[in-house]
């Protein structure tokens, strides 16, 4: 069986002919592999850390060619900022995404993709004890947030406009 390389993270996966996910620049195989890792974050001890993995994966597989892709990246960067800088609970990530979208904002302003090749991928979780997964998820999310530092001002402005009550002063 031949391998397929993910266009964003560069990981090789057996080519299963899976469709590419919408809103992400990832091979279907990469997305499926990340979903298997993410499944461990539904354990009661890890579910509160799950959104770190969701947001970090999305921001390391940004698709700036579609409105959905730009919106996905923007929302995930916004929640990363709220976790890292404003002390918001990562367990509220999905609720924050819904709240951010209430006014139907237009994020179709592609952000220049930072060099992401030096960042770890979801493979950091393979073979790791569940007790370490939460810490690794936070570290990965922090590294991804820092990689997007040229766009921090824009992300902060979006949060101030859409969820000002969640932004600490």
Image (tube, grey):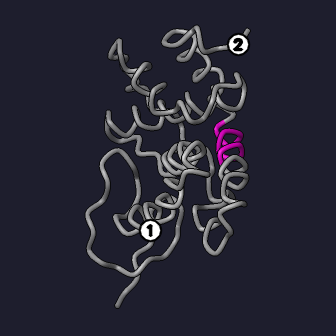
Crowding at dot 2, Cα within 10 Å, few <14 / some 14-19 / many 20+, comes out as few
Q: Which residues are magenta?
A: 141-148
Q: Residue 167: give x, y in percent of width and height.
A: 64, 14
Mark 1 lies on residue? 33
Which residue is situated farthest in the bottom direction here? 1
Q: Is residue 142 magenta?
A: yes
User: Which quadrant does the N terminus fall into?
Assistant: bottom left
In this view of the protein, which residue sits in the foreground, 20 or 103?
A: 103
Residue 168: image tag = 2
Q: Is residue 26 left or right of residue 19?
A: right
- In percent of width and height, residue 68 lies at 32, 36
Assign the magenta stretch its main secondary structure: helix
Image side of residue 21 versus residue 168, left or right: left
User: At x 41% / y 58%, what residue is drawn?
Assistant: 26
Q: Residue 2, position in %: x, y?
A: 36, 87
Residue 27, quarter of picture: bottom left
How many C-alpha atoms fall within 10 Å of the one at disc 1: few (<14), some, or many (≥20)? some
Frontmost residue, 142 versus 70: 142
SS at mark 2? loop
Marks 2 and 1, Cα distance to the nearest angstrom?
A: 36 Å
Looking at marks 2 and 1 on the same chain, the residue that comes earlier in the sequence is marked by 1
Please say if the residues under marks 2 and 1 sit with CB atoms less than 8 Å apart: no
The C terminus lies in quadrant = top right
* Residue shown at 47% from the left, 30% from the top: 75
Tell whether position 109 is magenta: no
Name the residue at 43% across, 60% down.
Answer: 35
**Between 33 and 89, which is closer to the camera in this rendering?**
89
């Amino acid at each position: 069986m031949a391998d397929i390389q993910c266009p964003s993270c560069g990981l090789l996966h057996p080519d299963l002919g899976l469709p590419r996910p919408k809103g992400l620049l990832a091979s279907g195989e990469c997305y499926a592999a990340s979903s298997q890792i993410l499944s461990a974050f539904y354990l009661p001890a890890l579910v509160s850390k799950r959104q770190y993995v969701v947001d970090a994966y999305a921001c390391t597989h940004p698709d700036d060619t579609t409105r959905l892709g730009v919106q996905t990246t923007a929302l995930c960067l916004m929640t990363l900022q709220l976790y890292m800088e404003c002390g918001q609970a990562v367990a509220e990530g999905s609720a924050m995404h819904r709240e951010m979208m209430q006014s139907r904002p237009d994020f179709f302003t592609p952000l220049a993709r930072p060099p992401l090749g030096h960042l770890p991928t979801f493979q950091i979780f393979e073979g790791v004890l569940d007790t370490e997964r939460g810490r690794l998820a936070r570290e990965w999310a922090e590294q991804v947030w820092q990689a997007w530092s040229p766009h921090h001002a824009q992300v902060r402005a979006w949060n101030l406009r859409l969820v000002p009550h969640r932004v600490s002063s």
